[in-house]
Image (cartoon, helix red, strand yellow):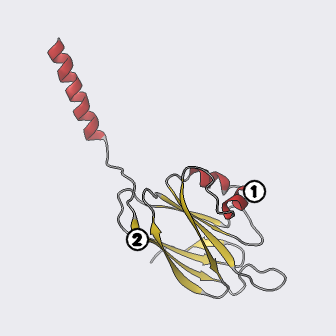
Amino acid sequence: MRRLFKLLIAFAVIYMNGCSSDKSPPPYKPGGIVISYATDDDLNTYDDSSHSVMLAVYQLNNINGFHQLAKDLTGTQKLLGLTKFDSSVLGVDSIFVNAAESGTIKLDRLQDTEWIGVVAGYYNLTAGQVTKEFQIPANSNKILKINLVLSPDSLQEVPAK
């Protein structure tokens, strides 16, 4: 009986190890996030003139907190405050972009980053139109490439070709 019990335990351990997958989070990667962007001539228009926009780029190990905040105006404003709103925030960067420009932003991907959240600080904030979320595949050592267009009042993703 004791031998059968040990055999069942050994089988269970082998079975459970065989079913598990190696889902270790992505490692640190210098230049591992590349954001290409283009802005409209009428970017962030206020009082009949265009204005720059701040992009807040969050590196996260879980998207839930960011996603919840991005649902409404108060949460979106909190995201633009560049704060560590919960323990999922591994890092946050701010970049200012101007009207009628295009460029590329390269950021180091921090250890354990699984998600990138981007928020654009328009004068006329509309929840759902100024945030984007991007997932980094597990075990990925590849560069995450993000293509954005900043229209007069919203942030849009352009799929890579």
Image coordinates for residue 151, horizontal then vertical, percent: 67, 78
**Secondary structure beneath disc 1?**
helix
> Label 1, label 2: how many angstroms apart (C-alpha)?
33 Å
Q: Nearer the viewer, residue 95 or 41?
A: 95
Residue drawn at the location 72% of the way across and 74% of the way down? 153
Earlier sequence position, callout 1 versus callout 2: 2
Could you tell me which quadrant the N terminus lies in?
top left
Q: What's the residue type where badge 2 is placed?
A: Pro
Q: Nearer the viewer, residue 44 or 56?
A: 56
Could you tell me which quadrant the C terminus lies in?
bottom left
Residue drawn at the location 40% of the way across and 59% of the way down? 137
Mark 2, residue position? 30
Mark 1, residue position? 74
Q: Nearer the viewer, residue 92 or 39?
A: 92
Quarter of the rendering containing residue 12? top left
Compared to 16, does 102 lie above or below?
Answer: below
Residue drawn at the location 63% of the way across and 72% of the way down? 55
Total marks placed = 2
Residue drawn at the location 71% of the way across and 79% of the way down? 152
Q: Nearer the viewer, residue 90 or 40?
A: 90
Q: What's the residue type where badge 1 is placed?
A: Thr
Asked if marks 1 and 2 touch (Cβ < 8 Å), the reply is no
Q: Give the crowd class for mark 2: few <14, some 14-19, many >=20 residues within 10 Å.
A: few
Q: Would you say 3 lies left or right of 92 here?
A: left
Compared to 24, does 122 lie above or below?
Answer: below
Image coordinates for residue 27, horizontal then vertical, percent: 37, 60
Q: Give the crowd class for mark 1: few <14, some 14-19, many >=20 residues within 10 Å.
A: few
**Secondary structure beneath disc 2?**
strand
Task: Indicate which label's residue lies in the foreground, 1 or 2.
Answer: 2
Q: Would you say 87 lies left or right of 8 here?
A: right
